[in-house]
Image (cartoon, rainbow, N blue to C red):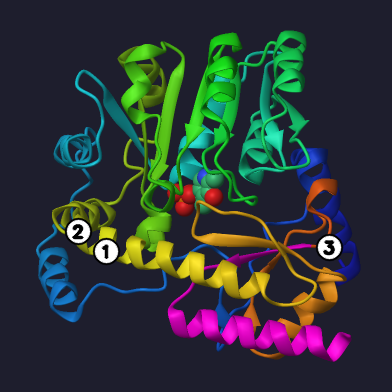
């Protein structure tokens, strides 16, 4: 058989087997960032201090890699409950990043005709994950100021009867916190479960965690990624026991590796180091926002996260100009009409913020 015939046969086989909607997708694109100032993915720019890294190294060296994780993760869960403000009587389920918690929710709720609803623009995994599981996704446009359009949300909830409603608090990629009164109205109206995604909690320091006892249909989801541990892949979701019981059934039993587990436990013992880094990032965010606002032609949106959303004329060209000057940011302008012309800029170190502001100033000057 010729190489062309072989490839044709493989194509045909694949088309019989792989879903058409999956084949039509393009993969999640992560650009190569080698040598660049990496401000595209909301990573904390700081490492742990050297002495803690050495201690961590010894802890990880002592982990028995020949053993499966103990699937209950009792030690790590109790550290999370104690150190991260989970209310008494509530527990958590762990995910390999909160991405996996979203997958687990999608799988557990994908009854025939099920619907997942979220405001848009928001975190893209809500929609992707719902679709992968075979559910319908309904996106409800935010108001022009990026707040929740409450009448539209309530109307869509009434009409579509969503199994899951996601609210990112603060929202990605807009950076704002939705109004608490509007959130409460959504939680009360939702016939299914409402997931408050608090991925940016370290930078907003506002939370619905303590309000879990008030609502039977609330799940509060967080991750250690934006706090400074994106590499270890650990998310957690707190909710009333019966929700957790169902999610546990669809959780791959060994989803958090023994190395993730040990590193997270260590990090929780040194939470003050991460809290101090988050404090620095919050202060640098305010400085960065003020300096960006001072640049001609830049509209800066208020942020409670570790990134700043800006609008510029001809965002793709500005994105490219920044890249040419060694700074990688995220062009979110094509995600949604409300984001036209918008770039999302992660708050890096003070020196990285300097590089970003200088580069953006040059790019804008060269285009005016
Ligand atoms: C980054 C992000 C996540 C994903 O977090 P992981 O734990 O790294 O999977 C979830 N939700 C929002 C809103 C995010 O921005």
Instruction: Please name which of the two marks, 3 or 2, marks the residue nearer to the observer.
Output: 2
The count of marks equals 3
Q: Quadrant of the N terminus?
A: bottom right
Give residue 151's position: percent from left, percent from top: 74, 18
The disc placed on residue 6 is 3
Identified at 45% across, 40% down, the residue is 198
The disc placed on residue 60 is none
What's the CA distance linking mark 3 and mark 2? 58 Å
> Ligand 1 within 8 A of label 2's CB?
no
Would you say residue 239 is visible in this rendering?
no
Give the prevailing secondary structure in the magenta stretch.
helix
- Mark 1–mark 2 contact, CB under 8 Å? yes
Instruction: Please name which of the two marks, 3 or 1, marks the residue nearer to the observer.
Output: 1
The disc placed on residue 276 is 1
* Secondary element type, mark 2: helix
What's the CA distance linking mark 3 and mark 1? 58 Å
Identified at 49% across, 60% down, the residue is 306
* Secondary element type, mark 1: helix
Q: In the rendered view, tell whether residue 231 sits above or below residue 154.
A: below
Q: Which residue range is magenta in the image? A: 342-368
Residue 19 lies in what quarter of the image?
A: top right
Disc 2 packing (10 Å; few <14; some 14–19; many ≥20)? few
Q: Nearer the viewer, residue 71 or 44?
A: 44
Which residue is denoted by mark 2 in the rendering?
A: 272
């Amino acid at each position: 058989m010729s190489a062309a015939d072989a490839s044709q046969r493989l194509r045909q086989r694949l088309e019989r087997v792989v879903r058409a909607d999956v084949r039509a997708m393009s993969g999640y694109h992560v650009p190569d960032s080698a040598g660049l100032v990496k401000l595209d993915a909301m990573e904390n720019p700081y490492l742990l201090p050297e002495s803690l890294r050495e201690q961590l190294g010894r802890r990880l060296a002592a982990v028995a890699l020949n053993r499966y994780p103990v699937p209950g993760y009792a030690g790590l869960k109790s550290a999370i409950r104690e150190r991260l403000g989970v209310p008494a009587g509530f527990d958590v389920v762990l995910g390999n990043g909160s991405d996996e918690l979203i997958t687990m929710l999608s799988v557990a709720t994908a009854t025939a005709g099920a619907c997942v609803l979220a405001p848009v623009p928001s975190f893209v995994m809500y929609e992707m994950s719902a679709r992968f599981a075979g559910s319908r996704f309904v996106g409800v446009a935010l108001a022009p100021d990026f707040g929740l359009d409450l009448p539209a949300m309530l109307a869509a909830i009434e009409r579509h009867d969503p199994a899951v409603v996601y609210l990112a608090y603060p929202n990605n990629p807009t950076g704002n916190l939705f109004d608490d009164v509007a959130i409460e109205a959504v939680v009360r109206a939702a016939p299914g479960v409402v997931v408050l995604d608090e991925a940016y909690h370290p930078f907003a320091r506002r939370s619905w965690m303590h309000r879990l006892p008030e609502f039977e249909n609330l799940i509060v989801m967080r991750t250690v990624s934006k706090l400074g541990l994106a590499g270890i892949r650990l998310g957690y979701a707190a909710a009333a026991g019966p929700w957790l019981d169902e999610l546990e059934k669809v959780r791959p039993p060994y989803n958090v590796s023994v190395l993730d587990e040990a590193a997270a436990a260590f990090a929780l013992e040194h939470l003050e180091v991460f809290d101090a880094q988050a404090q620095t990032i919050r202060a640098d965010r305010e400085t960065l926002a003020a300096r960006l606002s001072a640049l001609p032609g830049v509209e800066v949106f208020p942020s409670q996260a570790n990134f700043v959303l800006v609008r510029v004329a001809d965002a793709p060209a500005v994105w490219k100009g920044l890249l040419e000057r060694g700074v990688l940011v995220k062009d979110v302008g094509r995600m949604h009409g409300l984001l036209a012309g918008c770039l999302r800029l992660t708050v890096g170190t003070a020196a990285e913020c300097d590089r970003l502001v200088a580069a953006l100033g040059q790019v804008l000057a060269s285009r005016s």
